[in-house]
Amino acid sequence: MIALYVLLVLVCALAIQHRYAERCLERLVYENDLDRELAEPDQVLTLTSTVRNTGRLPILCVNLMELLPEQVRPEEDEAWCRRHLRRPVFGQSCTEQLWLPGRRRYTKQFHFSLPDRGSYVLGKYYLTAGDYLGLHTRYEQGTRRRKVVVMPRRWEDPQLALTLGGYLGEISVRRFLFEDPVLTIGVREYTGSEPLKQISWKQTARTGTLQVKNYDYTVDANVTVLLNLDGGSAAELERCLQMARTVCETLERRRIPYEFFGNGDLFGPQGELKWFPEGLGSQHYRTLMYALGQCKGTVYFSFPRMVERCVQRRRRSRGYVVISPPLRERDREALRALRRISETEPCLLTARAEEGGETA
């Protein structure tokens, strides 16, 4: 009698679950989140995935499969990888099998890294739900798009650091050579070497001693960075992007404002970056790194055309840093045009397949 009662209860439970499983996917909600949108190569990232049961009854069998880019390198222990990671014919995936009580959620974190520069999209998933016997299952596929951009690696080359450091040092020194008679920032005591027109007679009468006007400097240390992707091998273009990152980091560290010109497929979070205005700070830097990270090397116009645009926007007392594959003859003519508008020799950093930067 007891066995018959138990069997009856079991049959009823399975029947209810079987019927309820028909609408179980409507009660499941999948969400994911990535801890950052811009990353260093080999930096550990965290993908957080959540499955919620919004209904009151449990769902006995839930299977979640998340598709991952082929380049993803797991940063979990071997036991976790054996349990969750699969390599089907179409790439790499992270799977999880579970059951969810009513009004409960399941959350897991997957730590991984990406070794190469580029733009990676995560978030495509397959969600299956039903009963343990597999008598009635439903599945859905969807995308909760999460993109991460891996910026270029730093170009660690002593010659590049020496060339760039010397050029930026020259720009900084030029700032203190001349004073602007329009920008008065104070007065100081007359030493006998200043011209009479610099004497402030009002302050002299007030203090009883000769006072001369103290002017601000006429030159600000500022730089225009030109990134040329026209010509060169894939390795040279990659090196150009690495050099561009190193140059921007150096300018940020020295607090030298810089603007940016490019002739390739550079797209920031807000759109295309053929020209990026002068600035400093984390947001300025991150926008450029975002664009450099997802660049594929497509060239939109030539180096001479980019120099022409730069000449049209020229400003007084500005230094120019040109990053480029080996220049062709027509490109060198454009470089000479850049020299004509610059008070100092432009700094040319050439990306060669087996060499570091050099000065033109």
Image (cartoon, grey):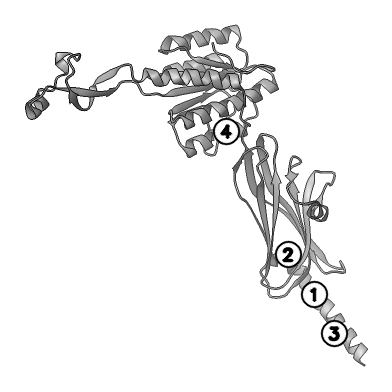
List x then y, in percent, for residue 152. Answer: 62, 32
Reading the chain from its start, which is encountered first: label 4 or label 2?
A: 2
In the picture of the structure, the residue carrying the numbered disc 1 is: 17
Graded by Cα atoms within 10 Å as few (under 14), some (14 to 19) or many (20 or more), the crowding at tag 2 reads some
| Marks 4/1: CA–CA distance | 51 Å
Q: Is residue 322 visible to us here?
A: no
Reading the chain from its start, which is encountered first: label 2 or label 1?
A: 1
Q: Of the residues tagged 3 and 4, which is closer to the observer?
A: 4
Secondary structure under the numbered disc 3 in the rendered image: helix
Graded by Cα atoms within 10 Å as few (under 14), some (14 to 19) or many (20 or more), the crowding at tag 1 reads many
Seen from the viewer's position, the closer of residues 227 and 252 is 252
In the displayed structure image, the side of residue 345 where residue 220 appears, left or right: left
Which amino acid, mark 3? Val
Seen from the viewer's position, the closer of residues 211 and 231 is 211
In the picture of the structure, the residue carrying the numbered disc 3 is: 9
Measured along the vertical axis of the image, is residue 248 above or below residue 106?
above
| Marks 3/4: CA–CA distance | 62 Å
In the picture of the structure, the residue carrying the numbered disc 2 is: 25
Seen from the viewer's position, the closer of residues 37 and 51 is 37
Q: Which numbered marker is on residue 135?
A: none
4 and 2 marks in contact (CB < 8 Å): no
In the picture of the structure, the residue carrying the numbered disc 4 is: 291
Q: Is residue 268 visible to us here?
A: yes
